[in-house]
Amino acid sequence: MTREQRNLILNILAIVSLFIILWLFNRYGTDYQIRILNNIAVFIILAVSYNLINGICGVLNLGPNAFITIGAYTSALLTMSPAEKKISFIIEPLIWPLNVIQLPFGASLVVAGIVTTVFAFLISYPVFRVRGDYLAIVTLGFGEVIRVLCNALQNLTNGPLGLKGLKPYTNLWWSWGIAVLTIIIVQKLINSSWGRAMKAIREDEIAAKAMGIDPFRHLLLAFLISAFFSGVAGGLLAHLITTISPTLFTFFLTFNLLMIIVVGGLGSTTGAVIGATLFAWGNEALRFVESPMQIGPLYIPGIPGMRMVIFSIILMVVIIFARKGIMGQREFSWDWIFSKIWSQRI
């Protein structure tokens, strides 16, 4: 058996083991535990796709909240029945043909990803005409434009009222199935000649261009793939929390994703998965710090937002003591595990 065949079998066994664990949680776990697992999966999709453009290509994109917004609203509008839309849009009726269309959840996720990708393609030309801080400002601006439009377009997004009462279609199979698919596709791309070209652009764009690499074409591919999976994750998120509004998709969401991939390690898919898991789990584990506490004679009042203060402190500590994050640019490898096992035996 070759090393590639062995690794493939181990990867399949790992995926099967993951879904067995998910089945056990789905059957015996509490609603709270299942919700945390769904949150972890959604953030893994977002972090892995965001890391593709930021970590692998070295492009500081500050507009993923725009893609998540488009995906969330698209999927939500497509899964709602015409009667539900008529009840929700009380100020202005929903525009045709969205007011009469209803699709299954899976189809709505695909359409959400495609619509988000089309939007990413339309803004790619102005975005990639600049680099560095200017590119970050342009993408940040697009993210804010989408948020403002969601507030203003009453006959499309229902404005500040948002969309409520969505069906909770997102379950462990949808969220983790798409998360695994995202990891596989992104890793296949990174390990291909296209991925190596993206890394060359990250290290030195001028040198990469001199070697015959087209930066625009490679960055555009990464941008579109990242947008597609962000849109799909937006649809999953919408049907997980069952209520969406423009206030949910602020730059704060982008900051969370940026923190995840920096802590995990820019350029590492494994690091993005670890960072997303720690963030989604830690966000719930630290909920107690925002509640009033009595420690002996000392009374500490609840401070809203204290979780993010702790996350910010963790981010600063990581940047100071582990500047490349938990994984740096390294990836999980079965070969590394077997080498450690053999070294221990020797």
Image (cartoon, helix red, strand yellow):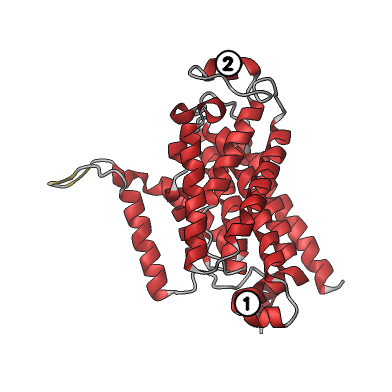
Q: Residue furthest left?
A: 297
- In terms of image quadrants, where is residue 78? top right
**Dot 2 surroundings within 10 Å: few (below 14), some, or many (20 or more)?**
some
Amino acid at dot 1: Glu
Counting every numbered tag in the picture gives 2
Q: In this image, 105 relative to 327: left or right?
A: right
Which residue position is annotated with label 1?
Answer: 205
Residue 150 position within the rendered picture, expressed as x and y whole percent measured from the top left: 50, 36
Q: Residue furthest right?
A: 1
Task: Work out how far the residue at label 2 is from the one at label 1, CA to CA, in angstroms.
Answer: 51 Å
Residue 87 position within the rendered picture, expressed as x and y whole percent measured from the top left: 54, 15
Residue 300 position within the rendered picture, expressed as x and y whole percent measured from the top left: 19, 46
Q: Point out the image quarter for the C terminus.
A: bottom right
Q: Point out the image quarter for the N terminus.
A: bottom right
- What secondary structure is found at the residue carrying circle 1? helix
Earlier residue among tags 2 and 1: 2
| Near-viewer residue (93 or 114) | 93
What residue appears at the point 51 percent right and 25 percent down from the top-left corner? 164
Residue 206 position within the rendered picture, expressed as x and y whole percent measured from the top left: 63, 80
Amino acid at dot 2: Lys
Q: Where residue 86 is drawn, which disc sits there?
A: 2
What residue appears at the point 46 percent right and 47 percent down from the top-left corner? 144
| Near-viewer residue (182 or 70) | 70
Residues at marks 2 and 1 touching, judged by CB atoms closer than 8 Å: no
Q: In this image, 288 relative to 246: left or right?
A: left
- What secondary structure is found at the residue carrying circle 2? helix
**Dot 1 surroundings within 10 Å: few (below 14), some, or many (20 or more)?**
some
Task: Confirm whether residue 310 shows in the render.
Answer: yes
Q: In this image, 65 relative to 191: left or right?
A: left
- In terms of image quadrants, where is residue 205? bottom right
Q: Is 329 drawn above or below residue 107 in the view shown?
A: below
